[in-house]
Image: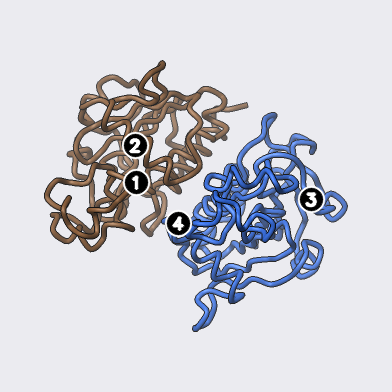
Chain colours: A brown, B blue
Amino acid sequence: MMHLILADSELEIIPKKIIKHPAVRNSKSKILDASLHHAAMKGLKQWQRRGRPDIVHVFLLIANESILNKEGMLRTYVHTRNDEVIYIKPETRIIKNYNRFKGLMEQLFEHGKVPPENEALMEMRKENLEKLLDKLEGKRILFSMDGERRKLEDIMEEDVICIIGGFPSGDFLSPVHKMVDEVVSIYHEMLPAWIVGIEAIVAYENKFVN
Amino acid sequence: MMHLILADSELEIIPKKIIKHPAVRNSKSKILDASLHHAAMKGLKQWQRRGRPDIVHVFLLIANESILNKEGMLRTYVHTRNDEVIYIKPETRIIKNYNRFKGLMEQLFEHGKVPPENEALMEMRKENLEKLLDKLEGKRILFSMDGERRKLEDIMEEDVICIIGGFPSGDFLSPVHKMVDEVVSIYHEMLPAWIVGIEAIVAYENKFVN
């Protein structure tokens, strides 16, 4: 089984501090989104990296539709900057439309699960990365540019936990370097989270599927 | 070099026939989008598969940010249901926000290039798949569920053209089966276009990069 964690992802409700800003006041969605709320965000610390539900969306579109997931060998988790963790059932079909996806994320923050009435496909719990990792079994690999350059197929094990940053720039907020077995770099430039996810998933498929 | 073609993709301007429908009239974007215009689309033939700019968007996000593209070994093209072809320069950074991406597509239909004033990063030409293929060199591989099940690394060649359907269901509209060297299936279920793209790109990377 591969456990895939998008860590410290920049997914959050619009902070109260900027809720009355003109760039935010008429926002249809309560999810902070840098592409809409840019003007208001300068009042927030670390504003340059925040408000990136788009990264979460594309990451989940590649993970949950992957062959590895369809084969039942992938579990995906989204950990946020404020230490929430979204548990996603493998059978979840991630909604393709970005605006509706944000609507679902809003429901998660509000009700803790989606859909709220039936058996949940996604569930959000207040939890930090360390607690999440404690529950999972496997070699812990952190993807980071400061890691050692390795070929992915060489380091994949049948039970593996891959941790990828869900932020556009900067470093992990969580003390994740202390929690892992190996820190790995797969390229000499920053890559978007979903590209790192792709490379990890396909490397695992090549080694353990078929 | 790998040439990657998203073929018969469901990208188009809202057809005149439905432009006065209430579900369309107040639409901010001129790009047909099934998730917004669903109620109006039933008046169109083949409406179930049309209006999927989201597929194009995610496909380009995985292609243009891939390691293969950063290494200069990938060229990406989007061919549409109405025989337009978008040429995308490898250095193009695909805009992450879906709504803005649709805005760019609208500009492409309007001006033929983006950005309109400077040297274009994306260019749209009236062209069918056959004409596009005539310009490119390499083994032509079509990805389709009716193809032969093959391991991708076995069939990749250094010069290769990979053709992937840019529609959510059904079959190619273009007579593409006649134009290719090999028809290949990589899984026993339908996969989204971007997942097929991922598998092709990473197989090529594993064989020819490094």
Residue B29 in percent (x, y) is at 51, 60
The CA span between labels 3 and 2 is 36 Å
Q: Which residue is mark 1?
A: A53
Q: Which residue is mark 2?
A: A105
Which is more N-terminal, label 1 or label 2? 1
Kind of element beneath mark 1: helix
Image point (33%, 24%), residue name: A113
Q: Which residue is mark 3?
A: B173
Residue at the outermost right position? B178
Position of residue B28 relative to residue A152, above or below, is: below
Please say whether residue B59 is visible from this viewpoint: no
Q: Chain of mark 1?
A: A
- Can marks 3 and 1 be said to lie on one chain? no
- Can marks 2 and 1 be said to lie on one chain? yes
Q: Chain of mark 2?
A: A
Kind of element beneath mark 2: helix
- Can marks 3 and 2 be said to lie on one chain? no
Image point (48%, 27%), residue name: A92
Q: Chain of mark 3?
A: B
Q: Are marks 2 and 1 in contact (CB under 8 Å)?
A: yes
Q: Chain of mark 4?
A: B
Within 10 Å of the Cα at label 2, are there few (<14), some (14-19), or many (20+) other Cα atoms?
A: many
Residue A173 in percent (x, y) is at 19, 44
Q: Are marks 1 and 4 in contact (CB under 8 Å)?
A: no
- The answer to whether residue A162 is left or right of residue B132 is left
Q: Nearer the viewer, mark 1 or mark 4?
A: 4
Q: Which residue is mark 4?
A: B99
Q: Nearer the viewer, residue A96 or A149?
A: A96
The CA span between labels 3 and 1 is 34 Å
